[in-house]
Image (cartoon, rainbow, N blue to C red):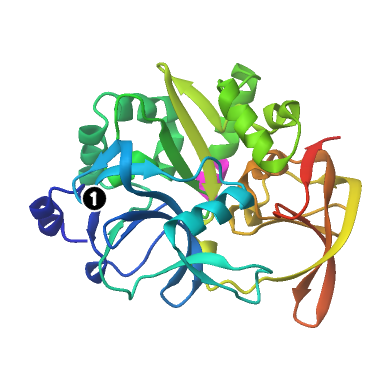
Amino acid sequence: MSTMVSESLGLPCWCSPVILAGTAYPGDIVFVRYNTVYVIVRRLYGDTYLAIPKYIRGLGPWRTVISGQLKRIITTYSPRSIHGAAALAGAKLEKTPQFSTNVPIVKLSDSDLLLCTTRPPLSPLELLEAERIAPGVWSQVYRFLNELADCVKPTGSLLQGSFTSFSDVDLIVDISRPRCLSKLVEFMEYMQYRSRSPPTADIVVVSEASERNIPVELVRRLLRPWTKLSIEGRRVSLSIADFNARLEPLRVIVETSKVIVDKVVDVEPYQQTLGDFPAIAVTNDGSYIVIYDGLFVPLVFEGGKLRVRGLKACLKKGDECLDAIVIGVREVATFIDIA
């Protein structure tokens, strides 16, 4: 990454034309033709990434040096909302063997791309830049996270340089390192002891529920204390990703049926495969849960006895067809709850 290029364009130090950056990490921001903003989810193959369109140029409270005013086009990260945002953004779509539907993509070899990228631990320069963009806020968050702070990266408005006084702080924990996975577990235990009611506005809960056709009270149970924080009055969201796994070409193939399965399963906690996309967990009966909707990941990551309602599927591993349940599709209401 060239700091001189970033400074000359008035951009955060981690942003530069894509010709100068070779890899995109989960949560990275890509400006396409400088008028559409995408969030990187994972690599599919080569320089092709699954990416969610989040903003387009238009009237809105967000502003960046490179694109001017931005209008948000996605309300939640439900499959239905992502599909609608892709249509509004005119996103490139691609159907691969790993997905039963077209997904929005970004190719880093395309022209007129700007990539804002970083990976934990942040360098001293990046830490200074985060504090410059979110003065006072970043240092408070960093102190609150304590030892977990070296395992997180900013995404959202902080990473793209459009942070305002009303912006949330969006963070991703890289669980690919054993130390970070261990520190996350310690943080989870601390937050669950400290508070069992995450500070989430009713409008957010209702929106998450309506997008998925699930009850509001279920969404409240899914929003875990360690994922939705309030630090000095600032809302902070925490999600997980295995950066190493998401950089590998996607090889998981899931064949989904139209048969609905509703059953109770036991899940061991802290499964690292839940940091990939799709997130995958093995149950104690040997079947698998395949999750395409991040709302359900934290509860499964905590483990325990869970009620799972999804579509019966086959998880392909070589010549084997492993029993699986798929969660997070547009066609039918699927969910995971505490049993």
Q: Where 107 falls versus 54 (above or below)?
A: below
Left or right position of 115 against 254 = left
User: Which region is colored magenta?
Assistant: 177-182
- The amino acid at mark 1 is Ser
**Residue 278 x, y percent position in the rendering:** 64, 59
| Residue 224 visible in the picture | no
Q: Quadrant of residue 154?
A: top left
- Left or right for 50, reference 216: left
For the question of whether residue 203 can be seen, the reply is yes
Query: What residue is at 41 percent from the left and 74 percent from the top?
Result: 47
Above or below 326: residue 227 = above
Q: Nearer the viewer, residue 181 or 127?
A: 127
Split into 4 quadrants, where in the image is the N terminus? Answer: bottom left
How many marks the image carries: the answer is 1
Q: Residues within 10 Å of mark 1 (few under 14, many from 20)?
A: some
Q: Position of residue 95 (x, y in %)?
A: 59, 74
Percent across and percent down for residue 55 are 39, 48
167 relative to 276, above or below: above
Task: Say which residue appears at 65% left-offset and 57% top-offset.
Answer: 273
Residue 287 counted in the magenta span: no
- Chief SS of the magenta region: helix
Classify mark 1: helix, strand or loop.
Answer: loop
Quadrant (top left, top right, bottom left, bottom right) of the C terminus: top right
Residue 180 belongs to the span the image colors magenta = yes
Q: Position of residue 213 (x, y in %)?
A: 74, 39
Direction bottom: furthest residue: 319
Quarter holding residue 202: top right
Question: Where 63 sits versus 187, above or below?
Answer: below
Residue at numbered disc 1: 67
The foreground one among 307 and 65 is 65
